[in-house]
Image: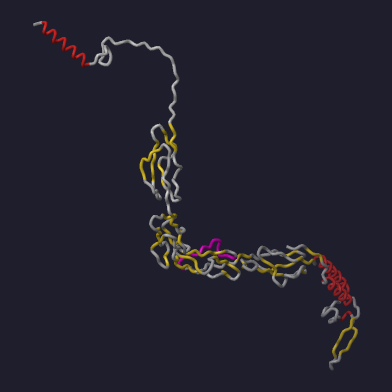
Amino acid sequence: MSRPVKSVSRLPLVVSVLSAVCIMCALGQSTTEVRHTEGGAKVAGEVSSSRVEERACCHRVTVTDPAMGITALFLLSFLGFAITAEAQSCSKPVGEANMNLKDDFINQDTFVDGAVVSFACNPGYTSAGGSSRITCSAGVWSPVQLRCERKNCGPLEEVNNGYIDYRDGTEFGDTAVVICNQGYISVGQSGVIRCDVNGWIGRLPVCDAVQCVTPARIVNGTFSPEMEFYSYREVVRYSCNKDLVLNGSGELTCSEDGTFHPAPPTCVWVECKDPVIEHAEFVEGSRPPHRHGASVKYSCKPGYVIEGTSTLTCLLNSQWSSPLPKCTKVIRPTMPTTTTTTTTTTPATPTPDSGNGLSPGIIVLIVSITALLLQNSCM
């Protein structure tokens, strides 16, 4: 609200002058009265105070007692002082949120006592009730009753093959986004619409079915099927010429944005060099030339131990999947030399391997000769 601004009104001065004139009339001061004759001529004459009926100073007021005139003078003078004390103007009022003074009052800085002004809601806002008028009284404005709320643009028309997402709402300043169904794409507009002073701004886009154009061709390769347009989620498959390998995805899909994903592959020549591993032996796997995906396995020769991966695979970059392994010679630890005394007991019964040192054949021969001699002696 505004601050009181003290200002002497012209009304007390007027009241004082009128009161003085009227008291003069009441006290019997002569006043010229204008009369009309029968012929229409004006005749001026003096009128006594006892016959005051119609004068220029007090129109149709009759005062017969001088005391009444004095009383009237006192009352009117007091009224003038009271009006002087009460008459204060107001500075420019300030409204509530989202409103301003109407154009008729916007350029005024001060307003006289009793002035009435009106507020109006700002563009994009509408009245939610309450009086738009306030009054200046003794330097203070009456409370602002007007309430302004954001204009509501309401819902938009439906979109075929899509829907509208009112992310913020449907009021002034809010935005709405058109989202197409899966397999459809927005055509024509950006898809974002804003609620403005005059309603929704922008035209609704159209949701059309997704179509992808023919994908890119690749060197030393081809794809199928080959058509002018492809529908949503339709797939094309790439292949390379003989002895070449696809580097990338071999299948591309028509996506929601009307393009194929992922990016087309390339056709590359892949050949890994035959591994050369010192002190190692080939165990199993492919033989040169080693193409993409070929595997080989190696092991170390006796007396050597392998360090690293024994199985290798040829990759797209013509490199083996792991660094070549190494065969490291096994170093046997030497036992420390110690001096010991050992006592050995010779068995009483000779064994075939130890005893008299005779071979089994000689022993059999001796036994046979002995038996023959004994036989002859008995005869």
Report the quarter where the N terminus lies. Answer: bottom right
The quadrant the C terminus occupies is top left
Number of disc labels: 0
Give the colour scheme shown: secondary structure
Residue 168 painted magenta: yes
Residue 145, percent from left and from top: 66, 65
Q: Residue furthest top?
A: 378
Q: Which quarter of the figure has residue 44?
A: bottom right
Q: Is residue 235 visible?
A: no
Work out whether residue 347 or residue 25 is closer to the camera in this orientation and state it. Answer: 347
Q: Is residue 310 left or right of residue 96?
A: left
Horizontal and vertical percent position of residue 27: 90, 76
Measured as percent of width and height from the top left, residue 128 is found at 61, 66
Q: Is residue 335 above or below residue 304?
A: above
Image point (88%, 89%), residue name: 43
Outermost residue toward the bottom in this view:
39
Of residues 51 and 243, which is closer to you in this image?
A: 243
In the picture, measured across the screen, residue 122 lies left or right of residue 343, that is right
Determine the residue located farthest toward the left in the rendered image.
379
Q: Is residue 99 magenta?
A: no
Judging depth in this view, the residue of 373 and 350 nearest the camera is 373
Is residue 92 in view from this perspective?
A: yes
In the rendered image, residue 261, in percent from the top left (x then y), is placed at 46, 59
Most common SS among magenta residues: loop
- Judged left or right of residue 67, residue 327 is left
Magenta stretch: give its range.
Answer: 160-172
Residue sitting nearer the eye, 51 or 73? 73
Q: Residue at x 32, y 10 (%)?
A: 345
